Image (spheres, rainbow, N blue to C red):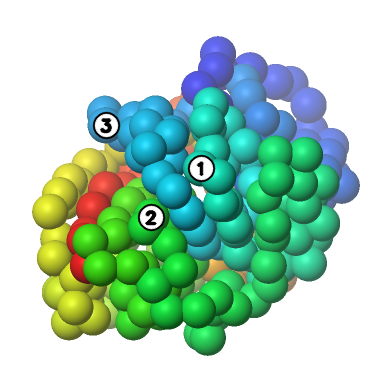
């Protein structure tokens, strides 16, 4: 999600929701939200750091590449580069974007990964939905590195709990301490682990609808019809307060085999 200038709007609830419902949510490009929502970026700069590591790798794999946008932005790719993605619209988009750079996009991205043991010296991922540590360890060669930015625990739960109510047990999910322990259990050594919580703002109800349609695990099964009353309440709150504030969480993890 890009940072931009908040767009104050006098458009009706119905107009904003209809626009957001008709927008394409393919890929992992959030430019539709420019001027309608903002999100702080982690201080470490994952895109730059990933690009540096890819530039020095011999064979690399990007897991759950989405529409390939993050990988495609790397200035230099290794001689052997592959990516996985399981959502059909994203497979098509990623293939079109990455094939000109010699990247093969494979499906699935769940175990077993379609690669031999020790096939890569670098595995990367930005915001994987599920992390299969044993498979990551299997496809890494000895001395190889997993370098990724993950969504952390209780990310954007202000918005999640607005629709679903309190989620005390779910708040622990994706905790960086647990992920680190799982990596170690799979035979990896964690050499870097950083966590930050980052401010987000939604400036109109259309931005909320688009976000929940795109990030489908936030409110599973989200539809406008199902949550129409809560959306109307949130629309009124945003018009009154100027925005809805939530906090995402991110952690950077680097682990070696």
In the image, is residue 243 above or below residue 19? above
Using the numbered discs, state the Cα–Cα distance from disc 1 to disc 2 in whole angstroms.
10 Å
Q: Residue at x 59, y 78 (%)?
A: 114
Give the quarter of the image for residue 83: bottom right
Q: Secondary structure at mark 3?
A: loop
Q: Are marks 1 and 2 in contact (CB under 8 Å)?
A: yes
Q: Total label count?
A: 3
Q: Residue at x 33, y 68 (%)?
A: 141
Q: In the displayed orientation, state which residue is furthest to the top.
A: 5
Q: Is residue 196 visible?
A: yes
Q: Is residue 91 left or right of residue 179?
A: right
Q: Is residue 70 left or right of residue 188?
A: right
Q: Pick whichever of labels 3 and 2 is earlier in the sequence.
A: 3
Which residue is under mark 3? Answer: 44
Q: Secondary structure at mark 1?
A: loop
- Name the mark on residue 78: 1
Which residue is under mark 2? Answer: 122
Q: Are marks 3 and 1 in contact (CB under 8 Å)?
A: no
- Mark toward the viewer: 3 or 2: 2
């Amino acid at each position: 999600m890009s940072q931009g200038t908040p767009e104050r709007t006098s458009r009706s609830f119905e107009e904003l929701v209809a626009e957001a419902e008709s927008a394409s949510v393919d890929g992992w490009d959030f430019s539709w939200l420019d001027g309608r929502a903002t999100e702080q970026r982690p201080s470490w700069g994952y895109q730059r750091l990933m690009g540096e590591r890819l530039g020095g790798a011999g064979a690399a794999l990007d897991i759950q590449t989405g529409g390939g946008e993050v990988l495609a932005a790397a200035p230099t790719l290794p001689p052997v580069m592959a990516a996985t993605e399981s959502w059909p619209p994203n497979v098509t988009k990623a293939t079109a974007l990455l094939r000109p750079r010699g990247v093969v996009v494979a499906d699935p991205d769940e175990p077993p990964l379609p690669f031999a043991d020790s096939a890569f010296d670098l595995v990367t991922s930005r915001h994987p939905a599920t992390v299969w540590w044993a498979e990551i360890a299997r496809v890494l060669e000895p001395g190889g590195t997993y370098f990724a930015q993950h969504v952390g625990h209780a990310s954007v739960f202000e918005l999640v709990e607005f629709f679903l109510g309190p989620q005390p047990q779910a708040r622990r999910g994706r905790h960086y301490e647990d992920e680190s322990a799982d990596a170690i259990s799979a035979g990896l050594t964690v050499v870097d682990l950083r966590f930050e919580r980052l401010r987000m703002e939604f400036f109109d109800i259309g931005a909320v609808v688009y976000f929940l349609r795109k990030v489908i695990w936030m409110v599973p099964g989200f539809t406008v019809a199902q949550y129409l009353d809560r959306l109307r309440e949130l629309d009124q709150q945003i018009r009154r307060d100027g925005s809805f504030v939530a906090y995402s969480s991110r952690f950077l993890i680097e682990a070696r085999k």
